[in-house]
Image (spheres, rainbow, N blue to C red):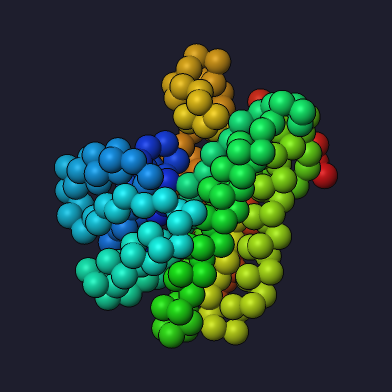
């Protein structure tokens, strides 16, 4: 992946930051997008490890104008785009009658609208160069339902459907589209703490990042449509 230009959203910490670091290890040039000033600290951490081609951008992935601005900055600095990692996401777990309309809207704006806007924004560049990869960090609940997670589950079903349709649309341009669907991961998701003792046997952010790098660095003639990953301790429905 040497000198490939990779955009990673939600790269301030957790899975996104680890994805960025592992891509840098493979020689990629990075564009890190985050919704807070924490994204700049994330970029400095990666630069401190010896990787200088890092461009941090503070932007809301659900804001089309802000995203287009980020794409313009990427092209100005690096000249092209090879890889998009849609990692930004939010989640909460409540019974349906406890979910407010504002909570529902915000979740869909980030988890679904953000994926749509970023993917749409990179397509002109990828189509022109007749190649590239779009990968989205979805969830195992994109394949089955859980109680107290109707909003989150619905958003991931939407992401899965969007990715599948997009893959068929852009295949003729040599563009690959896929999803990584993790189960329980030791991260900051849904307001939890990373590194809690009760998450000792869960997947680690390194596991998810390694899967992303594997998919992104596969030979150009090979498409990995979906990768579902669980910790051994997790019990889950097969379908």
Up/down of 122 relative to 212, above or below:
below
Q: Residue furthest top?
A: 197
Q: Position of residue 200 (x, y in %)?
A: 52, 20
Q: Position of residue 118 (x, y in %)?
A: 48, 62
Residue 13, quarter of the rendered image: top left
What residue sits 49% from the left and 40% below the top?
207
173 lies left or right of 54: right
Query: How many numbered marks does the figure carry?
Result: 0
Up/down of 231 relative to 127, above or below:
above
Which quadrant is home to the N terminus? bottom left
Q: Nearer the viewer, residue 58 or 168?
A: 58
98 lies left or right of 181: right
Which quadrant is home to the C terminus? top right
Q: Nearer the viewer, residue 131 or 31?
A: 31
What residue sits 41% from the left and 63% below the top?
65
What residue sits 61% from the left and 44% below the top?
105
Q: Position of residue 238 (x, y in %)?
A: 80, 41
146 lies left or right of 67: right
Q: Residue furthest front?
A: 101
Q: Nearer the viewer, residue 58 or 225?
A: 58
Q: Is residue 19 visible?
A: no
Q: Position of residue 185 (x, y in %)?
A: 55, 32
Q: Is residue 204 visible?
A: yes
Q: Residue furthest right?
A: 239
What residue sits 67% from the left and 75% below the top?
168
């Amino acid at each position: 992946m040497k000198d490939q230009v990779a955009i990673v959203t939600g790269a301030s910490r957790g899975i996104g930051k680890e994805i960025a670091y592992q891509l840098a290890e493979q020689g990629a040039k990075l564009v890190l997008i985050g919704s807070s000033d924490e994204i700049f600290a994330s970029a400095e951490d990666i630069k401190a490890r010896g990787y200088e081609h890092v461009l941090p951008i503070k932007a809301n992935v659900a804001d089309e104008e802000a995203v287009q601005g980020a794409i313009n900055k990427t092209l100005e600095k690096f000249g092209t785009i090879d890889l998009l990692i849609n990692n930004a996401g939010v989640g909460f777990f409540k019974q349906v009658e406890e979910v407010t309309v504002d909570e529902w809207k915000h979740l869909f704006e980030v988890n679904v609208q953000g994926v749509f806007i970023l993917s749409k924004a990179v397509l002109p560049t990828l189509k022109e160069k007749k190649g590239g990869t779009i990968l989205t960090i979805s969830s195992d609940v994109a394949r089955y339902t859980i109680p107290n997670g109707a909003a989150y589950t619905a958003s991931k079903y939407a992401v899965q459907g969007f990715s599948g349709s997009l893959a068929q649309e852009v295949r003729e341009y040599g563009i690959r589209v896929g999803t990584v669907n993790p189960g329980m991961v030791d991260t900051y998701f849904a307001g939890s703490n990373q590194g809690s003792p009760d998450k000792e046997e869960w997947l680690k952010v390194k596991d998810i990042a390694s899967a992303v790098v594997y998919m992104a660095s596969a030979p150009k003639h090979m498409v990995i449509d979906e990768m579902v990953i669980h910790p051994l301790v997790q019990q889950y429905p097969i379908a």
